[in-house]
Image (spheres, helix red, strand yellow):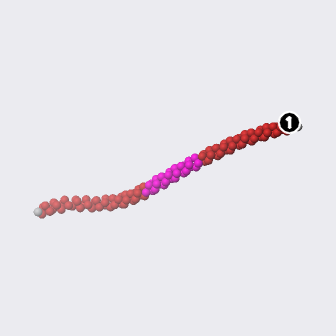
């Protein structure tokens, strides 16, 4: 029994020595874990900023698209207004032409009536 305990203690001695040797290594790892946590926090912060930048970019793209659509609507409205104006001008010109033709017909009719009256008047004398 004593021999077994002695051998057991011999087996434990290197393990304790290994544990003592490992302790400084564990201490060296601890700062690395802290450093890893800091890196992870920085990475998360970068991801958050990246996500925010993507959201801002998407908002800007939506705004630009909305402004382009609004611009297109204004251009279409302007074109319709211009066409309506051209149509109105053409209608005015057409009405002016018709008026001029009617006035000419009226003038011609009045001239004919005057000639007829003059003929009737001269034939009486």
State the residue at coordinates (34%, 60%): 30
Vertical placement of 30 versus 88: above or below?
below
Q: What percent of the width, then of the height, locates residue 39?
A: 39, 57
Question: Main SS of the magenta segment?
Answer: helix
Q: What percent of the width, then of the height, locates residue 25?
A: 31, 59
Left or right of residue 32, residue 18 in this image: left
Residue placed most toward the observer, 84 or 95: 95
Q: What percent of the width, then of the height, locates residue 66?
A: 52, 51
Give the residue pinned by disc 1: 123
Residue placed most toward the observer, 76 or 53: 76
- Residue 54 in view (yes/no): yes
State the residue at coordinates (28%, 59%): 22
- Residue 111 in view (yes/no): no
Vertical placement of 24 versus 67: above or below?
below
Q: Quarter of the image for the N terminus: give it.
A: bottom left
Residue placed most toward the observer, 5 or 56: 56
Q: Secondary structure at mark 1?
A: helix
Residue placed most toward the observer, 30 or 6: 30
State the residue at coordinates (12%, 61%): 3
Q: What percent of the width, then of the height, locates residue 81?
A: 62, 47
Magenta residues span 48-77
State the residue at coordinates (77%, 39%): 109
């Amino acid at each position: 029994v004593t021999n077994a305990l002695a051998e057991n203690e011999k087996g434990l001695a290197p393990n304790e020595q290994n544990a003592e040797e490992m302790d400084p290594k564990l201490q060296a790892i601890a700062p690395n874990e802290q450093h890893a946590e800091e890196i992870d926090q920085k990475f998360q912060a970068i991801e958050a900023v990246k996500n925010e930048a993507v959201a801002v970019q998407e908002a800007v793209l939506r705004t630009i698209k909305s402004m382009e659509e609004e611009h297109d609507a204004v251009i279409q409205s302007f074109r319709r207004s211009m066409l309506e104006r051209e149509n109105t001008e053409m209608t005015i010109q057409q009405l002016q032409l018709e008026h001029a033709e009617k006035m000419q017909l009226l003038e011609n009719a009045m001239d004919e009536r005057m000639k007829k009256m003059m003929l009737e008047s001269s034939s009486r004398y």
